Image: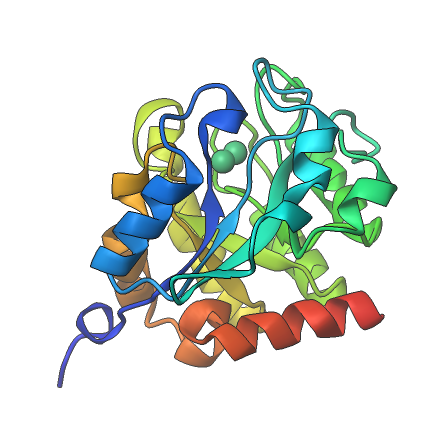
Amino acid sequence: MKEVFEILNIKIDTHVHTIASGHAYSVLSDYIRIAKQKNVEMFALTDHGPEMPGGPHIFHLGNQKEIPSIIENVEILKGAEANIINYKGEIDIPEFILKRLDIVLASLHTPCIESSTIEVNTQTLINTMRSGVVDVIGHSGNTLYPIDIDRFVRAAVENNVLIELNSGSFEGSRSKSWQNCIEIARKAKKYGAFITTGSDSHIHYRLCDFDKIYKIMEIVDFPEELIITTSKDKLKDFLKMRRSK
Ligand SMILES: [Zn+2]
Ligand SMILES: [Zn+2]
């Protein structure tokens, strides 16, 4: 029998940064070019929220209607990666902007919020999910912000929020997150939480580089039906369902 990670070939990436994020190195046309080379079907533009040093003004995030939804057969979701800015779980992008976006990620980042206890970090993410304005929690396996993974995953299911497996998580500042991500995937399987796949590319070459995510899925024997990015319609239907509630 073939291994799961050999069969999986996900062509949707829900986490991508451009130069607008301040510390990334590619523009949209670079991503389109590499998407065509890699047969990527869809990706989400998720530049950082304005509290990230060097991040864009909210007008940049809100003006993405200027970008066609499909360029050269590659579908583009207009989104953002908001910063969670306090323990109430509030984010740095106002609702009138969020309403214009196809997909909203929210993540804990230095220097936008200080890590606290496991209890407080977990409750912060739960508060963000309960706010209803966020579709995805990004890189929750980050060891800089330890959480109660069991509680977090159950809350994601209750609040219809996607959990991201982030293939950019295993280098640099988030390098110790491997074990956490395996645990997150295990709990997602146990509780039936949907996961999404994000490269967190800060340069276009990394678009849809998901080998490490496939490895986690193999280790956990993760059910394919819980991966939201196996088809464009599956992802779009989920986002529509979320917003209708
Ligand atoms: Zn992030
Ligand atoms: Zn990111």
In terms of image quadrants, where is residue 7?
bottom left
Taking the view exactly as shown, the residue that stands out farthest to the bottom is: 1
Where the C terminus falls, by quadrant?
bottom right
List x then y, in percent, for residue 23: 44, 20
User: What residue is shown at x 45% (from left), y 33% (from top)?
Assistant: 18
List x then y, in percent, for residue 11: 34, 65
Answer with left or right where residue 111 lies relative to residue 170: right
Q: How is the image coloured?
A: rainbow
Residue 93 or residue 128, whichever sits in front: 93
Residue 214 or residue 82, whichever sits in front: 82
Residue 138 or residue 94, whichever sits in front: 94
Where the N terminus falls, by quadrant?
bottom left
Q: Is residue 64 above or below residue 7?
A: above
In terms of image quadrants, where is residue 19?
top left
List x then y, in percent, for residue 34: 27, 49
Answer with left or right where residue 171 lies relative to residue 46: left
User: What residue is shown at x 67% (from left), y 26% (from top)?
Assistant: 117
Answer with left or right where residue 158 lies relative to residue 209: right
Visible residue check, residue 105: no
User: What residue is shown at x 38% (from left), y 53% (from top)?
Assistant: 182
In terms of image quadrants, where is residue 28?
top left
